[in-house]
Image (spheres, rainbow, N blue to C red):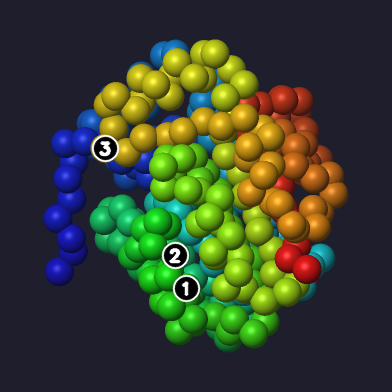
């Protein structure tokens, strides 16, 4: 039986879906999204740029790094070019585990669980603050003796400093073997308008988002070998020439991909 959805409060996955132009959201999500848009109209573009980074990172990991296992935490609602679709276009035998704690994502999980022949996709309902549950669940699908790409896209900003986000990333990476990768992106506190917009969002959402400085976000990659060009504004990480006319030179979000020694 599907879990009971609380549609009275905005939820980050559904607000993000709204900002990306999706239909899987409710009035509270749209109201929260509109608050952000009013204070920072560029947020919808940042959302699209962040989504393009997911595609570029997965293509790099599958095609150039040869990774065929992905642990995607904070999946969000299914849209075009999900992790498994991109990875399995390149390596059909790729195995993907999605993790999220929004009941609506669980309702839509069937759309995430389609897989290329020979590949596997699975879904875990769990909170990133419980990495042990995530790793134990993922081990039913992924082989942790072989490299895994840990995807943390837009999720660490949802973790308050009191929950020690750096320790969560370290815990997850410690569970993965050498040769694994971390792909991470998050919004930065570099725009007063965005800071104001997120403050308004936090007052009208069931969850809160925590913008951090570029240096603090880069700190999540401590001990990893960064893939060139390193930790950079999201539109500058291995840009696709097809997107060059659409993406600004700078956005208030950074990203990177790092390899575990």
Residue 132 appears left or right of 245? left
What x and y, as percent, mark residue 34?
A: 36, 21
The residue that mark 3 highlights is 206
Q: Is residue 199 left or right of residue 70?
A: left
**Do the residues under discs 2 and 1 have CB atoms within 8 angstroms?**
yes
Question: What's the residue at 69%, 42% (across, down)?
Answer: 218
Where residue 74 sits in the image (x, y, percent)?
45, 54
Q: CA distance from mark 2 to mark 1?
A: 6 Å
Residue 73 vs 87, above or below: the answer is: above
Which residue position is annotated with label 1?
135
Q: Position of residue 49 (x, y in %)?
A: 62, 36
- Which residue, given by chain and number where applicable, does mark 2 sit on? 131
Above or below residue 220? Residue 200 is above
Upstream in the sequence, badge 3 or badge 1?
1
Sequence-earlier tag: 3 or 2: 2
Mark 3 element type:
loop
């Amino acid at each position: 039986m599907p879990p009971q959805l609380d549609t009275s409060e905005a939820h980050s996955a559904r607000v993000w879906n709204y900002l990306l132009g999706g239909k899987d959201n409710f009035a509270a999500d749209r109201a929260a999204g509109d608050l952000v848009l009013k204070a920072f109209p560029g947020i919808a573009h940042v959302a699209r740029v962040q989504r393009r980074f997911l595609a570029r990172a997965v293509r790099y990991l599958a095609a150039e790094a040869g990774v065929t296992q992905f642990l995607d935490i904070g999946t969000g609602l299914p849209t075009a070019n999900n992790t498994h679709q991109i990875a399995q276009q390149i390596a059909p035998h790729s195995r993907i585990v999605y993790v999220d704690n929004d009941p609506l994502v669980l309702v839509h999980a069937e759309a995430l669980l389609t897989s290329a022949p020979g590949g596997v996709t699975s879904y875990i309902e769990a909170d990133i603050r419980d990495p042990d549950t995530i790793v134990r669940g993922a081990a039913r699908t992924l082989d942790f003796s072989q490299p895994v790409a840990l995807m943390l896209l837009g999720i660490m900003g949802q973790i308050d400093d009191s929950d020690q986000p750096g320790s969560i990333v370290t815990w997850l990476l410690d569970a993965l073997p050498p040769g694994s990768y971390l792909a991470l992106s998050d919004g930065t506190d570099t725009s007063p308008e965005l800071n104001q917009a997120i403050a308004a969002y936090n007052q009208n959402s069931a969850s809160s988002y925590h913008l951090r400085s570029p240096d603090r976000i880069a700190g999540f990659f401590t001990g990893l070998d960064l893939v060139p060009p390193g930790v950079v504004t999201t539109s500058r990480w291995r840009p696709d020439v097809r997107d060059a006319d659409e993406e600004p030179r700078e956005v208030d979000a950074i990203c990177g991909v790092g390899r575990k020694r």
